Every structure is written in structure tokens, then in C-alpha cells.
Image (spheres, coloured by chain):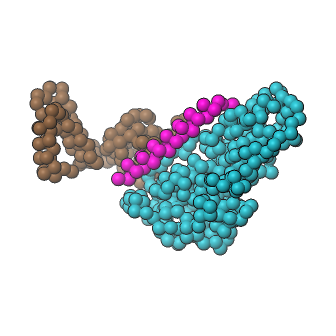
Chain colours: A brown, B cyan
């Protein structure tokens, strides 16, 4: 997270420069500073990005209270794969029972593969990303129905 | 680390003892350099640091102090308390834990690196074991029951590895990371093994039929094979005219053909010079695949140009640099 002092400094730097827009991502925070005229479309996407960042920071799955559905979020930015190797059996399929340590998928970034664990016990009800998709940090990958 | 059981053949090897072949001292070193380098990168060691090379049947080791290791190469079913230890990633093991190996699932040679490196005195600039001369490595020989290996202290930059591992909340006596390097595709396959080679210096001295046979037929790795060389069995390869040769330099991957026509692939412990005609040279990148084959397996050769071999080599080096950078960035 940025301190007020850091934010002030960033705004000052942006103000003095000829840059129109500065986007910064650090761990689980995304900061967008824009000056001058902001077009309608950009405004919409700015708001959306802010909302996504909020979601990442709070990490609360939307439907949890109603149906005991848990979202498995990606631990890292990268490319999502359903199986260990191309052509291999996928880690999980819809309907499969998983435990907290069950590996449900991998996300590859800079040639390193990150195992995504289920973290809860339950049944895989939906797969939210496709094999080979580029995934953002905190993006939901699976829906697990817990008891 | 205490050796409770030695396994079939376990020795300390690094990337080789270079610079002394002119004195008749062989290079030795690991059979599968690629797996060794990754094993070292995974624990933050310099790529050329020595590791334990484990062949086919693994040892039983008691870990003396809390240690971070990595296991790469062949899948010899590494286990702790009956639970599988994941490979190709850093693993932190609590002291007094016993690491052992089970069935050989794929490949032939496994590498066990330890953060900080094994405390082995270098001989002529290398920690590799030169078995026939009895120098280097652990007392110049394979490991035996009762041997105790000291581990050098980890360097400052290796602490983030350990800290990151310790964050994983696991209640067993080992903690493995959730990230890993992908096992190279085809590294440990046992079917349809094709080794890419470039033509040897004396390729043209072989008759046309033999030249075709070399690339067309398959050969079996006989049981008369070890770290010095693999003796192959197959259709005999003959020279156009019987030729006397002066001994010339040979190296890891040189394929020579003695008078019986059965090729020998020279490996890590090969001699420095050879007098047999050299029909081909294994491309450096495919030494990895070769190192993971075992006696009894069938292999074939396919020809590539020197340029292709160089390109493959460069691609691999780039890949290793990418992994190194990725691991460094990832841990910070």
C-alpha cells in the first residue's frame, strides 16, 4: 500500500512531467493516476479497475453468504493451465471432490509454475478460466461448493 | 547428512574438472548437466555447485540440520515418512528427518542439491569424483553407509528462499514450495528415444551402407555400460577401408566405433583421447536425454547440422538464464 507521502510525491512528479497517465501495480494494489481530460471510455475502465482492485484487496467472493460457494483466486499473474503438461489429464474436473491441499491448476509466470491449491474442501462446480488464458493476480479460477 | 543406505551408485559431482585433460586428467562431472544446474538454481546455489548424483536406486539419508534441498532429474520416488517429496522445486526439511527413495519411475539419474553446497574439498578446481583415480568428491569414491556429509552455510541471498518456504503452513517434517520448474519434456521418456548428433570427424570413412544404418537402425544399450561409456548393440558398422588411426581428443558424447563395429558412446568419465574412428558427436543438449537412459533401452540417432546443434545449445542457455532471473525476481 502507498503512504500519503508517497502518493503526494507521485502526484507531484506526474504533475510536473508531460505524462498524462501513470499506472502502477504493486503486490495487491493497483494505482492509476491520470491528469487532464479523461474520455468517457477511459473513465469507465478507470472505475472498473478501481473496483477490481477493491475486490482483490478485500478478497471476498460475491456469492459466499447464499450458497457456500468458494472462489479459488489466482496467487499470481500469469498463464493458467488445467493440466501439468499439454495433453496430460487435467488436475480436476467438474464434480470432483477436492481437499484443501488438492492442486487444482497451475499458473505459469516467467517459466515458473505455481500450483494452485483448493484451500477448502468441497466439490468443483465451475471452472472460471480456460486453459492457456492470461490471468491477473487474484482472478477467480474455480468455484468450489463447500459443505 | 548421514548416509544410512548408499543406494546403487551415489557420488558427488559438479560440472566437471576442466583444464587438465592435457595432463591426462579426465573431466568427470555430472551426466545430466541440465538437471544439476536447475537443482542448484532452485536452492540459490551457483549453477556449477556440486550435488549428489544418484543412480537408479536411491540412498537413504538422515538430514542432520534444517536443510533446504531440491531434487531434479529422474523420478526415483523420493519420500519422507511414506509421503512423496515433490521434485523440481525447493524443499525445506526439518532436522532428523529421513529422506529415502523408492521405485525408479522414469529416467536414470537424480540430482540432490543442498542450499549452501556440500562441504567437499575441491581437487584441481572441482568437487567431481574421479573414480578410477580415487580423487575428488567424497574421498574419491561412491558414497557408502556411514558416510557423513557436511553442508556449507547458506549465503545471505538464499535466506529469502527459506523464508518464503517457511510461510507455507505445513505440519509434516518437510515444506515444499508451491512453485516449480517444469520438468523438461521428453527428459525421462523411455519410448522412442532419438538422440540428435552431428557427423563425426571420421563419418565419411564408413561405407555408405553403414552410414545409412547408423541413422536408420536402432541400437540397444548393453549392460556393459557405465559412466565412462555406453556400449551399444546393433547392426555392425564398417569402414570403407580398414584404417589405422592416431589417437585424437574425444569428449563426452563422442560416438566411436571399434573394430567389432558396435558403437560406444563416450560419457562423463571417458578417457581424454581415443584411437577409434568417430562416427558422430551427440549434440550437447541431448546429453541430458542420454544421461537419463539405462541399459536395456533402445535408442536411435538423428542427424542435425552443427548450426542446429549450436542453436539448440543457445536456446537452452537462454532458458536457464530466464529461470535464474525468474527465481530471483519471484523471491523478492
Magenta region's main secondary structure? helix
Q: Left or right: where does residue B111 sit relative to residue B242?
A: left
Is B199 contained in the magenta span? Answer: no
**Residue B223 percent location from the top left of the image:** 79, 50
User: In the drawing, does residue B245 fall left or right of residue B313?
Assistant: right
Q: Quadrant of residue B127?
A: bottom right
Residue at screen point 54% across, 38% down: B314
Residue B128 lies, in percent from the top left, at 63, 59
Range of residues picked out in magenta: B303-332
Q: Is residue B212 left or right of residue B285?
A: right
Pick the front one: B1 or B243: B243
Q: Position of residue B299 (x, y in %)?
A: 73, 39
Task: Judge whether A28 appears above or below B311 on screen.
Answer: below
* Image vertical order of residue B39 relative to residue B236, above or below: below
> Could you tell me which residue is drawn at 64 percent across and 67 percent down?
B138
Count of numbered badges drawn on the protein: 0
- Give the vertical position of A45 relative to B137 (above or below): above
Judge by depth and name the residue closer to the eye, B282 or A34. B282
Front residue (pair B249, A82): B249
Residue B181 in view of the camera: yes
Residue shown at the point (16%, 52%) measured from the top left: A3
Q: Is residue B305 located in the magenta-colored stretch of the structure?
A: yes
Residue found at x 55% / y 65%: B118
- x and y percentages locating residue B331 in the rendered image: 38, 53
Quadrant in the picture for residue A63: top left
Q: Is any atom of residue A143 visible in this view?
A: no
Amino acid at each position: 500500500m502507498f503512504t500519503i507521502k508517497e502518493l503526494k510525491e507521485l502526484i507531484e512528479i506526474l504533475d510536473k512531467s508531460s505524462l498524462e497517465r501513470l499506472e502502477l501495480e504493486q503486490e495487491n494494489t493497483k494505482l492509476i493516476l491520470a491528469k487532464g481530460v479523461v474520455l468517457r471510455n477511459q473513465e469507465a475502465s478507470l472505475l472498473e479497475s478501481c473496483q477490481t482492485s477493491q475486490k482483490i484487496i478485500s478478497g471476498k467472493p460475491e456469492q459466499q453468504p447464499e450458497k457456500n460457494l468458494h472462489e479459488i483466486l489466482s496467487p499470481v499473474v500469469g498463464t493458467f493451465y488445467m493440466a501439468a503438461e499439454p495433453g496430460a489429464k487435467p488436475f480436476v474436473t467438474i464434480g470432483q471432490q477436492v481437499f484443501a491441499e488438492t492442486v487444482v491448476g497451475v499458473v505459469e509466470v516467467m517459466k515458473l509454475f505455481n500450483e494452485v491449491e483448493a484451500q477448502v474442501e468441497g466439490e468443483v462446480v465451475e471452472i472460471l478460466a480456460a486453459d492457456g488464458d492470461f490471468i491477473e493476480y487474484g482472478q477467480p479460477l474455480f468455484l468450489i461448493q463447500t459443505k | 547428512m548421514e548416509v544410512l543406505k548408499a543406494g546403487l551408485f551415489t557420488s558427488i559431482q559438479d560440472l566437471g574438472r576442466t583444464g587438465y585433460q592435457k595432463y591426462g586428467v579426465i573431466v568427470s562431472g555430472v551426466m545430466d548437466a541440465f538437471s544439476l544446474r536447475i537443482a542448484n538454481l532452485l536452492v540459490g546455489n551457483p549453477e556449477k555447485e556440486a550435488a549428489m548424483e544418484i543412480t537408479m536406486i536411491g540412498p537413504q539419508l538422515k538430514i542432520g540440520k534444517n536443510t533446504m534441498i531440491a531434487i531434479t532429474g529422474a523420478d526415483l520416488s523420493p519420500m519422507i515418512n511414506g509421503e512423496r517429496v515433490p521434485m523440481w522445486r525447493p524443499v525445506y526439511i526439518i532436522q532428523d528427518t529421513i529422506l529415502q527413495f523408492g521405485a525408479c519411475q522414469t529416467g536414470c539419474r537424480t540430482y540432490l542439491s543442498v542450499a549452501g553446497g556440500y562441504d567437499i574439498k575441491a581437487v584441481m578446481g572441482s568437487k567431481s569424483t574421479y573414480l578410477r583415480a580415487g580423487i575428488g568428491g567424497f574421498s574419491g569414491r561412491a558414497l557408502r553407509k556411514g558416510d557423513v556429509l557436511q553442508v556449507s552455510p547458506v549465503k545471505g541471498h538464499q535466506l529469502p528462499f527459506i523464508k518464503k518456504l517457511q510461510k507455507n503452513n505445513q505440519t509434516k517434517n518437510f515444506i515444499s514450495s508451491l512453485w516449480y520448474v517444469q520438468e523438461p519434456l521428453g527428459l525421462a521418456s523411455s519410448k522412442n528415444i532419438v538422440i540428435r548428433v552431428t557427423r563425426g570427424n571420421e563419418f565419411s570413412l564408413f561405407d555408405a551402407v553403414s552410414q545409412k544404418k547408423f541413422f536408420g537402425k536402432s541400437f540397444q544399450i548393453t549392460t556393459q555400460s557405465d559412466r565412462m561409456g555406453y556400449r551399444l548393440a546393433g547392426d555392425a558398422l564398417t569402414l570403407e577401408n580398414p584404417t589405422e588411426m592416431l589417437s585424437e581428443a574425444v569428449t563426452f558424447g563422442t560416438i566411436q566405433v571399434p573394430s567389432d563395429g558396435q558403437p560406444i558412446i563416450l560419457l562423463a568419465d571417458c578417457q581424454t583421447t581415443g584411437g577409434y574412428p568417430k562416427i558422430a558427436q551427440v549434440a550437447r543438449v541431448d546429453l541430458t536425454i542420454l544421461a537419463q537412459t539405462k541399459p536395456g533401452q533402445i535408442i536411435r540417432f538423428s542427424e542435425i547440422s552443427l548450426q542446429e546443434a549450436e542453436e539448440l545449445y543457445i536456446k537452452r542457455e537462454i532458458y536457464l538464464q530466464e529461470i535464474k532471473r525468474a527465481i530471483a525476481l519471484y523471491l523478492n
